[in-house]
Image (cartoon, rainbow, N blue to C red):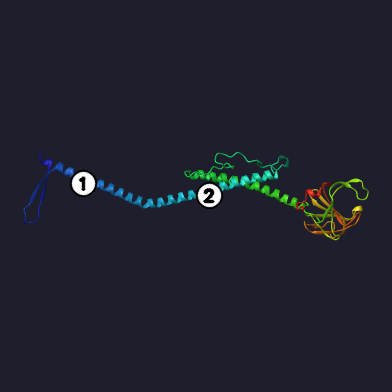
Amino acid sequence: MSENKSFTLIVVPDRHAEVKRFRLEKRWVIQALAAVAVLVVIAGALMVHYVTVVASARENPALREENLKLKSELAVIREQLDHIGGTLDRVERFDQKLRAITLLSDPQRNLAMGPTEAQPLPAGGETNGFVRPKASEAPQALTQKLDKLSAEATRQEQSLQELQAYFQDQKSLLASVPSVWPVRGWVTSDFGSRLDPYTSERVMHAGLDIAGPHGKEVIAPSDGTVVFAGLEGGYGNVLVVDHGYGIKTRYGHLSSINVKPGEKVKRGDMMALLGNTGRSTGPHLHYEVRVNGIAQNPRKFILDEW
């Protein structure tokens, strides 16, 4: 029984030395082998952990660098969103002011696209509903805001295109309004009721009589097309210019006319010379402005009063 519980280890150093015997308990051997096995397993686990730690240590700087880069890019996107949102706010406010000034949103003009009065501002102070991005917002939320801003920018572009078309039309209208004096001189008879210098009866005077030196140049007060040039009763040599939009101007008592029917004139072009033809008491220009055939006071259109 004792042999089964121990091992004998024989050591022979060399041929002249004494053989040595060591008696080892079996349980000691088993415990030693178990301890060695445990150490091997622990060493293996430590080795695997070491390799993992080394790999992570190599990967972490790259991840940190990428993370910093992403944070920097997100910060730039947030700044851009904030800038675009502010710009759209200013554009929308300007759009509303222009529409209010030009009455472009008047329902009777059939051009309404937006409000003429500033709308109540939301909590963030933005008129277009854009909420400024927060520093903690996720990329997905920022993408949604970009999409919303893109749609808002498209709407504003359409609105401004309409305003541009309106002002192009207004440019043509303003160019057609007789807003300058056709000749400089003394207004001897104003628009309205007056005593006729020949009959001494009170009659309606449909224009202005502007006295000046014989032969003084008469210029076009606005862009237009000559529709008549010739004699017309007591007005002598008469010139009529159609400016469009129902506006026509008439010039009477001219000494000569330098343009022909069908000819285009621009504001400031010389058209005729002041004279004393027809029923006239002295050199002067009889100047009328008619809108849709109705005589209007020319002073209403003239901007450069003296």
Dot 2: element: helix
Viewer-nearest residue: 82 or 220: 220
Which residue corresponds to mark 1? 36
The residue that label 2 is drawn on is 80
Residue 12 location, x and y as percent?
9, 53
Residue at point 21% right, 46% down?
36
Q: Residues within 10 Å of mark 2 (few under 14, many from 20)?
A: some
Is residue 153 something that shows in the picture? no
Quadrant in the picture for residue 263:
bottom right
Q: Amino acid at mark 1?
A: Val
User: Quadrant where the N terminus lies?
Assistant: top left
Report if the CB atoms under discs 1 and 2 are less than 8 Å apart: no
Whether residue 125 sits left or right of residue 256 in the image: it is left
Q: Nearer the viewer, residue 288 or 82?
A: 288
Name the side, left or right, on which 107 lies relative to 144.
Answer: right
Point 49% across, 45% down: residue: 139
Q: Is residue 175 above or below residue 144?
A: below
Indicate which label's residue lies in the foreground, 1 or 2.
2
Return the x and y of residue 152 as percentages of the image width and height.
60, 45
Alpha carbon of mark 1 to alpha carbon of mark 2: how far? 65 Å
SS at mark 1 in the image: helix
Query: Label 2 is placed on what type of residue?
Result: Gln
